[in-house]
């Protein structure tokens, strides 16, 4: 066995994916703070443009040249998806506690299974259906917990609806990023991800833009840097390991969200949120785990 195939090398994609989730979780906390201070649209578009400005020089230094037409189409596709995915997600963060929003967003990998069936022709196995049911029940438990506390205001419903829309886009994003990471490097992906997303959102500036204060700009700039670093780490990981193996790493985001939600906003984590998250994560684990190989089949 070569050194490149050793245990350390096999664990590196998982470590990179986990680090990427951590960076993006901190970015979520900064963006919630900035969105509450200056508006969701302004915070989202500036984050994308800051991220592109930070990472683009590194891509230019690589001198890899402009991407081919087919690769550029993938960059455009993901940039458009990411623009509206981010806008709806950050809007939801202004209406919901950080941990609850992240927990509900975990249904995205389950939705991605159905996108894989439609777009990639993959067969939906019975376990995926069971997993989807668990994920749906988990979401109902979290939302039901808010009902029980009398927290389901019109703003909260708007946040849940926005989060559902973002989760659908995020699920489609799983399909695109896997194809994208096979034909482009992490730095290129991060550059076009932020740049195209920012340019798409910039079209709405005459109608939605506000003037951010200095404090909000600092948070948005930090979020832009974390976005670029997190996107590169995850792209690097997805290029070196199967998506079904890496998707469970996404669930560490709930731990980060719980901690950061408490540190930044003093948001408590409720029992229904924990129970619902457990159901969603269990469903995702069932859906993504590989079947156990029988000894006889392995020998034959």
Image: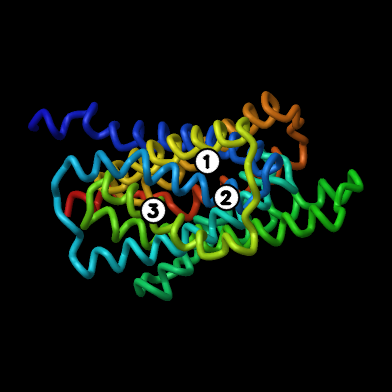
Which of the two residues, 89 or 120, is positioned nearer the viewer here?
89
Q: Residue at x 14, y 46 (%)?
A: 63
Mark seen at residue 195: 3
Q: Residue at x 56, y 52 (%)?
A: 283
Lower sequence index among marks 2 and 1: 2
Q: Quadrant of residue 18?
A: top left
Lower sequence index among marks 1 and 3: 3
For disc 3, the neighbor class at 10 Å (few under 14, some 14 to 19, many from 20) is many
Helix, strand or loop under label 3: helix
Q: Are marks 1 and 3 in contact (CB under 8 Å)?
A: no
Q: Are marks 2 and 1 in contact (CB under 8 Å)?
A: yes
Residue 7 position in % (x across, y down): 23, 28
Q: Residue at x 37, y 70 (%)?
A: 122
Which of the two residues, 218 or 1, is positioned nearer the viewer here?
218
For the residues labelled 2 and 3, the Cα–Cα distance comes to 26 Å
Residue under numbered circle 1: 251
| Residue 124 appears left or right of 146 | left
Residue 50 position in % (x across, y down): 44, 42
Q: Are marks 2 and 3 in contact (CB under 8 Å)?
A: no
Which of the two residues, 9 or 215, is positioned nearer the viewer here?
215
Residue 180 position in % (x across, y down): 29, 58
Name above or below for residue 163 compared with residue 266.
below
Mark seen at residue 228: none
Q: Can you tell which of label 1 and label 3 is closer to the viewer?
A: 3
Residue under numbered circle 2: 106
Q: Residue at x 60, y 32 (%)?
A: 214
């Amino acid at each position: 066995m070569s050194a490149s195939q050793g245990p350390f090398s096999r664990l590196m994609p998982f470590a990179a994916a986990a680090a990427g989730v951590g960076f993006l979780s901190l970015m979520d906390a900064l963006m919630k703070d900035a969105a509450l201070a200056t508006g969701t649209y302004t915070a989202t578009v500036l984050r994308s443009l800051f991220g592109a400005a930070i990472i683009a020089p590194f891509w230019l230094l690589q001198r890899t040249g402009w991407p081919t037409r087919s690769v550029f189409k993938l960059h455009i596709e993901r940039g458009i998806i990411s623009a509206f995915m981010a806008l709806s997600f950050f809007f939801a963060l202004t209406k919901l506690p950080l941990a609850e929003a992240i927990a509900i967003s975990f249904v995205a990998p389950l939705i991605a299974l159905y996108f894989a069936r439609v777009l990639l022709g993959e067969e939906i196995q019975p376990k995926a259906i069971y997993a989807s049911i668990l994920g749906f029940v988990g979401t109902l438990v979290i939302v039901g917990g808010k009902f029980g506390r009398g927290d389901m205001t019109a703003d909260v419903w708007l946040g849940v609806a926005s989060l559902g829309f973002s989760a659908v886009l995020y699920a489609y994003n799983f399909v695109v990023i896997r194809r994208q990471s096979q034909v482009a490097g992490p730095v290129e992906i991060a550059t076009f991800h932020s740049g195209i997303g920012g340019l798409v959102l910039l079209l709405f500036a005459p109608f939605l833009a506000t003037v951010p204060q200095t404090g909000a700009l600092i948070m948005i700039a930090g979020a832009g840097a974390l976005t670029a670093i997190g996107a590169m780490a995850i792209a690097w990981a997805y290029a070196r390991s199967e998506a079904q193996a890496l998707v469970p790493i996404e669930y560490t985001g709930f731990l980060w969200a719980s901690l950061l939600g408490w540190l930044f906003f003093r948001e408590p984590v409720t029992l229904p949120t924990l129970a619902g998250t457990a159901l969603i994560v269990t469903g995702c684990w069932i859906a993504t785990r590989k079947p156990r190989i029988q000894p006889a089949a392995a020998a034959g």
